[in-house]
Image (spheres, grey):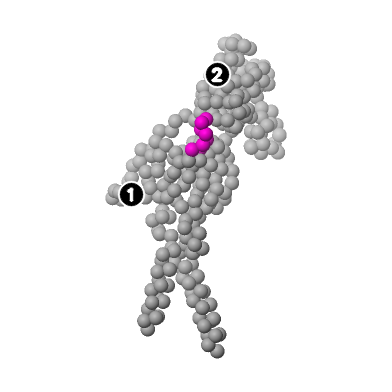
Amino acid sequence: MKRFLVIANILIAILFASCVPYKDTVYLQVKETALNDTTQIITEAQKPYRVQINDILNIRVKALDQDNVQIFNPIGEQNLNATNEQRAYFDGFTVDLHGDIRVPTLGKIHVLGYTTEEIEKMIESKLLDEQFKETANIFVTVKLTGLRFSINGEVGGPGTKTLYQERVNIFQAIANSGEIRDTGDRKDVLIIRQYPQGQQIHHLDLTDVNVMKSPYYYIQPNDMIYVKPLKVKALGAGTTALQNLTSVLTVVSVITTVILIFKL
């Protein structure tokens, strides 16, 4: 009887020790304060994105006489079979290793570290100074060709994604990547971000509602997101009590069978 109780206690300990706690799977928990019906969070003001190396810019120039500015505008839209990524690659303006783009008739323009609005004014000013008059009513728009990021680790759909939005938060990025698996660590999601001086790693706790206050809550182009595995995956244990119970019963069954065979 004592042996049975010891074995039972061991099985119960194994059963629950390897389970992923419920609180580790729930997003945006209100920690350190009482839970109210309404939780107000003031998110961090997002700073304007400044262009980095390898970004691809979409530049459009419009004027009263559109034929005069046709050379500046992409022609890939005529190819209906091309994907958005292909059009962006062939018709966009890629920021080179020196932080420059090459624009027809204008030559190289240094854009590294500038916002898209600043680049619009820069190009518009050069066009008016060098080629057109005020009466041409030049109108320039500059946009990033989608927000491109990579995500790896414990998610349903790892890989490189492109979202055609100006603002994307970490939850939207994950939602477009197949959600975090049960074996993923939601308390320490890594954002690897590119800066002019190099790359930096930032940490986000997605189970804490205050993550929305983080300056890294909104992702940026070329971000790399990594969701680490929980220890239960390294141990090979299940993520739920039922999975653990099944594993334990299987092991017990095998051991019992081996003992009975040797006794025969």
Read off the residue under disc 2: 122
Q: Which mark is residue 196?
A: none
Position of residue 167 measured from the top left corner of the image (x, y, whole percent) = 49, 36
Q: At numbered mark 1, what does the secondary structure look like: helix, strand or loop?
A: loop
In percent of width and height, residue 4 lies at 40, 80
Say if 58 sits above or below 233 in the image: above
Tally the marks.
2
196 in the magenta segment: yes
Q: Is residue 12 left or right of residue 145?
A: left
Q: How far across and how far down the image is residue 53, in percent?
A: 58, 30
The amino acid marked with disc number 2 is: Met
Tell me which segment is drawn in magenta. 193-200
Q: Say if residue 69 shows up in the picture.
A: no
Residue located at (47% from left, 60% from top): 232
Q: Residue at x 50, y 59 (%)?
A: 234
Numbered tag placed on residue 31 in the rendering: 1
Give SS at disc 2: helix
Which quadrant of the figure contains the C terminus?
bottom right
Residues marked 1 and 2 touching at CB (< 8 Å) = no
Q: Is residue 109 visible?
A: yes
Residue lying farthest bottom? 264
Residue 85 picture quarter = top right
Q: Nearer the viewer, residue 97 or 134?
A: 97
How crowded pointer 1 is (Cα within 10 Å; few <14, some 14-19, many 20+) is rated as few
**What distance separates the C-alpha of mark 1 from that of mark 2?**
47 Å
Indicate whether residue 41 is drawn in magenta: no
Q: Residue at x 38, y 74 (%)?
A: 9
Question: With 48 as the anchor, is 74 left or right in this view?
Answer: right
User: Is 246 above or below relative to 199?
Assistant: below
Instruction: Residue at 37% x, 46% y: name it.
Output: 209
Q: Residues within 10 Å of mark 2 (few under 14, many from 20)?
A: some
Instruction: Please tell me which of labels 1 and 2 falls first in the chain.
Output: 1
